[in-house]
């Protein structure tokens, strides 16, 4: 075990570890330290040396990787990503079976986009709520969730990230409200209401809730992305756009729950009307 860090120049450690694509520096240095029986924070301090943050050149020498390889694979070496608290908040472990295939016995935490929710090779949920290996639930009995993950990924490829994130967040609140109105959330009013009224879809803390609402959330997000431009169109008829949205939403939730769907959408539609009016006023001011 290395204990005399200050007098040692940076050189490759005896044991190397695989640097995964989009793995955080925090995760990589933790695994590298464990492989060499070094306290992780001691390794990070030595790799940082005079700085508060890990230095790419020093980490390259310690890990045995060329600097350009680490910079291409790891997240957290640039100024906008190097804060360790942010790395831990944004990261989650990739599929445990995928890491096992690579001979890695510890979790590998990567900076993954919200739309990467399922490992299709092994049929496991790896979405934002899966913060531990035990959270990576099998989707053997949830084939619709895997299909929705592909639809979510397709939305992300066709649209700007902020558009998809906003639509997913809005859709999540609508879905939870709709389930609450039809008394079918199975989670209690307080839990569903709290998540529905605030927070991001990705911040939902339980895997069960993510999986239970994911199919409807992705379908509703697609409806929002498709219908929102018409709702905000200053020259169009908002009543026509509203009817079209309600029809599309009923196709998501089922016509038998139309009353609950209308109630769930009421607040969201009012918000779109406010946005539309604010745009109208802005145009008047600038003309």
Image (tube, rainbow, N blue to C red):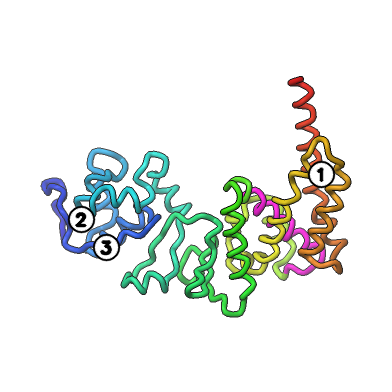
Q: Residues within 10 Å of mark 1 (few under 14, many from 20)?
A: few
The stretch drawn in magenta includes residue 63? no
Among the two numbered marks 3 and 2 on one chain, the one whose residue lies closer to the N terminus: 3
The quarter of the rendered structure image containing the N terminus is bottom left
Q: Which residue lies furthest to the bottom in this view?
A: 141
Callout 1–callout 2 Cβ contact below 8 Å: no
Residue 57 point in image, percent of width and height? 23, 45
- Horizontal and vertical percent for residue 65? 23, 54
The boundaries of the magenta stretch are 165-185
Could you tell me residue 224's position as x and y percent?
Answer: 72, 52
Please name the residue that numbered disc 2 is placed on.
64
Quadrant of res 37: bottom left
User: Mark 1 highlights which residue?
Assistant: 270
Magenta portion: prevailing SS class = helix
Who's the residue at 75% across and 26% down the image? 282
Q: Residue at x 73, y 55 (%)?
A: 223
Residues at marks 1 and 2, CA–CA distance in whole angstroms = 57 Å
Separation of residues labelled 3 and 2 (CA atoms): 9 Å
* Percent of width and height locating residue 210: 62, 64
Q: Is residue 177 magenta?
A: yes
Determine whether, in the image, residue 112 is placed left or right of residue 199.
left
């Amino acid at each position: 075990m290395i204990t005399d860090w200050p007098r040692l120049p940076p050189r490759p450690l005896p044991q190397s570890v695989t640097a995964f694509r989009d793995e955080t520096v925090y995760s990589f240095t933790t695994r590298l330290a464990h492989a060499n029986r070094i306290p992780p924070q001691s390794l990070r301090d030595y790799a940082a040396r005079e700085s508060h943050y890990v230095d790419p050149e020093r980490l390259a020498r310690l890990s045995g990787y060329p600097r350009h390889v680490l910079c291409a694979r790891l997240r957290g070496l640039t100024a906008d990503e190097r804060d360790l608290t942010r790395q831990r908040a944004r990261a989650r472990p990739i599929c445990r079976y995928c890491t096992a295939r690579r001979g890695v016995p510890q979790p590998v935490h990567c900076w993954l986009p919200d739309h990467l929710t399922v490992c299709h090779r092994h049929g496991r949920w790896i979405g934002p709520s899966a913060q531990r290996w035990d959270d990576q639930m099998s989707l053997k009995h949830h084939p619709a969730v895997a299909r929705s993950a592909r639809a979510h990924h397709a939305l992300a490829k066709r649209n700007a990230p902020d558009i998809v994130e906003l639509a997913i967040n809005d859709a999540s609140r609508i879905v939870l409200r709709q389930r609450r109105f039809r008394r079918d959330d199975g989670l209690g009013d307080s839990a569903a209401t709290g998540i529905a009224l605030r927070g991001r879809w990705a911040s939902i803390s339980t895997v069960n809730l993510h999986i239970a609402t994911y199919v409807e959330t992705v379908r509703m997000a697609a409806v929002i992305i498709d219908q929102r431009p018409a709702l905000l169109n200053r020259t169009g008829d908002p009543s026509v756009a509203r009817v079209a949205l309600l029809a599309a939403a009923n196709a998501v939730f089922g016509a038998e729950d139309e009353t609950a769907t209308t109630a769930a959408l009421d607040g969201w539609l009012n918000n779109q009307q406010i946005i539309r009016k604010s745009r109208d006023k802005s145009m008047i001011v600038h003309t």
